[in-house]
Amino acid sequence: MDRRALLGLKTRPLRVSGGGGGAAAAQSTYLALPTITANVVRTGGRRGMMTVETGIDTPDAALRVRVAQSMPRLRAAFAVAVQQSANVIRPGAPPDVERLVAQLQAATNTVMGRPGARLLIGTVMLS
């Protein structure tokens, strides 16, 4: 058993679904990042949690290698962006997902030094 996968320390590349298979389908352009969490204030003053699932799609092979090498920096930048977004959520209000995606894409571009790595967002959940 791989304990890094249980702790969320291992990135999980997913397969790209292609029609014909072959070499193009074997090479994945998507890298999933571990779940990012942040604290929020819920109604009544209680504390809650905001959970965000993200991934990065990078068609450029050279940039994909750089994305894989920059995972710790990307996770740190994403954690800051998610916490900043969680800080402005009013109790009982839903998160502004469009603003969050824009902040996360800007953080991705800043960490990578250039555009080309496209942020994909999975789930944004408040609990």
Image (cartoon, helix red, strand yellow):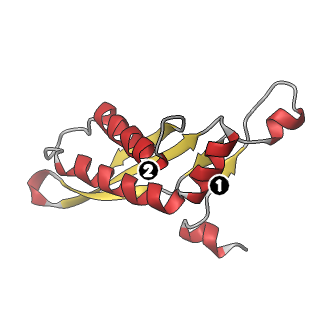
* Front in this rendered view, residue 59 or 78: 59
Residue 105 image offset from top left, x and y in percent: 41, 38
* Front in this rendered view, residue 79 or 113: 113
Residue 64 image offset from top left, x and y in percent: 64, 45
Q: Which residue is mark 2?
A: 111
Check the picture and name the quadrant holding the N terminus. Answer: bottom right
Asked if residue 81 lies left or right of residue 72, the reply is left
| C-alpha span from label 2 to label 1 | 20 Å
Front of the two marks 2 and 1: 2
Q: In the picture, residue 40 is in which quadrant?
A: bottom left
Q: Secondary structure at mark 2?
A: helix
For label 2, the crowd category at 10 Å Cα-Cα, with few meaning under 14, some 14 to 19 and many 20 or more, is some
Q: Amino acid at mark 1?
A: Arg
Q: Residue furthest front?
A: 113
The answer to whether one can see residue 127 in this image is no
Asked if residue 29 lies left or right of residue 32, the reply is right
Residue 108 image offset from top left, x and y in percent: 44, 44
For label 1, the crowd category at 10 Å Cα-Cα, with few meaning under 14, some 14 to 19 and many 20 or more, is some
What residue do we see at 61% from left, 44% from top?
63
Q: Amino acid at mark 2?
A: Val
Asked if residue 32 lies left or right of residue 18, the reply is left
What residue do we see at 61% from left, 48% from top?
31
What residue do we see at 13% from left, 44% from top?
90
Q: Which mark is residue 77?
A: none
Q: Which residue is mark 1?
A: 12
